[in-house]
Image: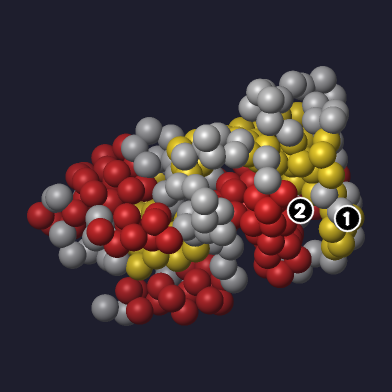
Amino acid sequence: MRILIIDDSMVMRNIHKNILLENKIPEESFLEAQDGTTALMFARKEPIDIFLVDWNMPGLDGLELLKTLRGMEQYSSTPIIMITSEAAKYNVMEAIEAGVTDYIVKPIKDRVLWEKISKYFTK
Amino acid sequence: MKAVFINPFLNASINLFKTFLDVKLTNKNPYINKDAQNLHEISAIIGLAGDTKGAVVLSFERETAIKMVSRFSKKNYFALTREVIDGVGELVNILAGNAKKDLLDFKLTISLPGVITGSKYKINWPKDVPVITIPFESELGDFTVNVSLKDKD
């Protein structure tokens, strides 16, 4: 399984990685990117099974990345989970319209985040 | 700037620091800051744009910033590293993104966070819009959340 963690904050990427490690997801499954453009490069290079995506990033942001991935046949139904501080209703609606699989607002306790995303790791 | 605009930032701050990070804190009364360049040593800034314009600045002393990011990342930092600066930026990002939820008068976008350090920096606050400061006293040190948001035209 390949998991791509996309967040411009190094601290956030580490927090996500630690949650996955604590839940026995092997470290060799992770790839990380600090912006949408880098994420897209990874996604074109090798198949990704789950995307954990922040919204606000330099260059290609999370919403644009989501739209681009959904336009690619191989990622039309791949779990793309947005983990973002963007809590306004209109942001959530935009992401849903763009085809997000799940939308999680930060801050979120590690245990609660894992409860929300673990189902995508068992499929 | 309407006083009512400050509540979403106050609520988002309490949710982030008190509820989520479990920091013991009290907020003092918000006030109009006539000297809004005079902040703590580390300031994280986010610009607000869209239906109106504004800025949010989260400002800490160095030790408080280090302790807050240590608490946030569950990792002990002892100096103002690149990761601590990154973490301070993430804190203001969460604060601003969460506050948007209750700013029902506006549809807003938030900028990427910027973090500045030192004693002589200058913040480009929106012109002719007051800055409201919410002071917090916390077990990890005092800090302020500073907001300037233009009323809708």
In three-dimensional space, the C-alpha distance between marks 1 and 2, rounded to whole angstroms, equals 19 Å
Looking at the rendered structure, which numbered label has been put on residue B68? Answer: 2
Residue at (68% x, 65% y) in the render: B15
The answer to which quarter of the image holds residue B23 is bottom right
Residue count near mark 2 (Cα–Cα under 10 Å), binned few <14, some 14–19, many ≥20 = many
Residue B113 rendering spot, x and y as whole percentages = 58, 37
Residue B55 lies, with reference to residue A89, above or below; the image says above
User: Which one is nearer the viewer's eye here, B151 or B25?
Assistant: B151
Q: Residue at x 69, y 61 (%)?
A: B11
For residue A51, above or below residue A119: above
Q: Amino acid at mark 2?
A: Met
Residue B78 in sight: no
Task: Inspect the image, locate mark 1, and give the three-letter code of the amino acid beneath it.
Answer: Lys
Q: Quick check: A41 left or right of A77?
A: right
Residue furthest to the left = A73
Most foreground residue, B22 or B35: B35
Q: The residue tagged with tag 2: helix, strand or loop?
A: helix
Taking the image as shown, residue B145 lies to the left or right of residue A60, namely right
In the image, taking residue A68 as reference, residue B57 lies left or right, namely right
Pointer 1 chain? B
Q: Position of residue B107 (x, y in %)?
A: 45, 47
Quarter holding the C terminus of chain A? bottom left
- Residue matched to label 1: B28
Give percent across and percent down for residue B148.
68, 37
Name the front one of labels 1 and 2: 1
Question: Which of the chains bears the disc numbered 2?
Answer: B
Q: Is residue A92 left or right of residue A45?
A: right
Q: Residue at x 84, y 58 (%)?
A: B27
